[in-house]
Amino acid sequence: MSAPLLRVEALGKSWPVDASPRARASALLRALLGRPIARTPVLREISFEIRPGESLGIIGENGAGKSTLLKLIAGVLTPSEGRVQLNASVGALLELGAGFEMERTGRENIGIAAGLMGWSRREIESRTPEIEAFADIGRYLDEPVKHYSSGMVVRLGFAIIATVRPQLLITDEVLAVGDESFQRKCIRWIEDYLEHGGTLLLVSHSTYHIQKLCKHALWLREGRVQAYGDVFDVTQDYLAYHERKIAAERGPELDAGYVGNEYRLVRVAINETEDESARLLAEGELLRVDAELHSPDGRSPQFSFGVIRADGTALYGQVAEIEGVRGEPIGGRRTRYALEIDPSALLPGSYVLRLHAMDPEGLRVFDTVERAFTLRGASRELGCLRLPHRWLHAGATR
């Protein structure tokens, strides 16, 4: 097994609690006297390694320490504890504009960056057209960088990295800036880079990009490693955590003792569990739904359900009555519905099951309850649904 290009061991970073000039002077005096300084930890006990050809995505909420971690690895910041061991040439795209001299032109910045990487004048002259073509910013290459838009800064920075092709590429949300066509261009380049043995460390809020480009993932939460492993396992746990958080903020939806004047859902159980936390479903696992509805007038309310993607895109819906199904009266003006849903047509990811209580005529939705669920599994298919298909041309293996 090849030696790691990057090894991070028990890495930590903390900042002084008060960063005012007076506080800094006081902290310096305390340090000289050997007294402790009050500090706030940002990262604690971070450990992982990346070997040649591997790709690691880092995810987490704002403030989790993702950008700080990359700066420590890139040498922009000094760790408070632990160590970073690098055995590779590194290309880092960190904060927007980091590494550029804003008063100089893009062309001058290419020369500065190339010189710092040890290129000769002849190499700079011969490879600048390649950088210019990849960046595709036209006449702005000869304008000061301070006049660039955020997208143009990213274009220039990524073009330099793409031409250098470092052993280890470190990027921080670079795919979230710029126009869609350039984002696609960057993704294609990264995929080619990985296919030819490149090594990637990517920070992104997009679990789609993390799953598409990375084999492993690390989830940072409040400065600590919450999960580290297979990209699909970690990202699905991360999405399920957010669904649980949203459900907790929303508060309880059901009132089992409701006896009011509306048709209401008063009890919902998913796979025999009534709590509102997101469900994690293994491949092939079914969704069992048990629902009790209250009727104010004794008539049987209609029941419907739907499945939506986490971003709100509707995927499927059905009303019990359309399929000739009526609820089971269970007394006390209550009606019971039970059904089993096979989600195998859905791709791995996070979804929401919506349940509705309607009037007996099916004209109005009186009550809605949502339950989140995450489908586990490894798939690089696109979209939400898996459609049965087969390839027909000569040479197809599937």
Image (tube, rainbow, N blue to C red):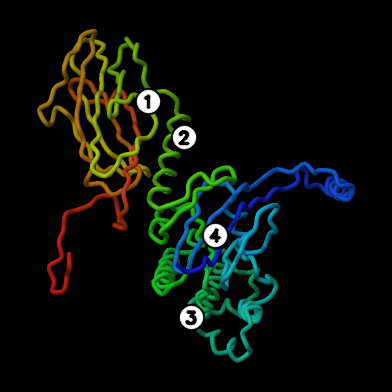
Q: Earlier in the sequence, mark 2 or mark 4?
A: 4
Q: Quadrant of residue 381?
A: bottom left
| Quadrant in which the C terminus is drawn | bottom left
According to the picture, the residue beneath numbered tag 4 turns out to be 172
Q: Earlier in the sequence, mark 2 or mark 3?
A: 3
Compare residues 220 and 346 and report the one nearer the observer: 220
Q: Earlier in the sequence, mark 3 or mark 4?
A: 3
Classify 10 Å Cα crowding around label 4: few (below 14), some (14-19), many (20 and above): many
Mark 1 to mark 4 CA distance (whole Å): 37 Å
Q: Are marks 1 and 3 in contact (CB under 8 Å)?
A: no
SS under mark 2: helix
Mark 2 to mark 3 CA distance (whole Å): 45 Å
Q: Quadrant of residue 273?
A: top left
Compare residues 320 and 371 and report the one nearer the observer: 371
Q: Earlier in the sequence, mark 1 or mark 4?
A: 4
Q: Say which mark, if any, is on residue 133.
A: 3
Q: Quadrant of residue 357?
A: top left
Q: Say which mark, if any, is on residue 188.
A: none
According to the picture, the residue beneath numbered tag 2 turns out to be 245
Task: Give above or below for 218 relative to 340.
Answer: below
Residue positioned 27% across, 15% down in the render: 294
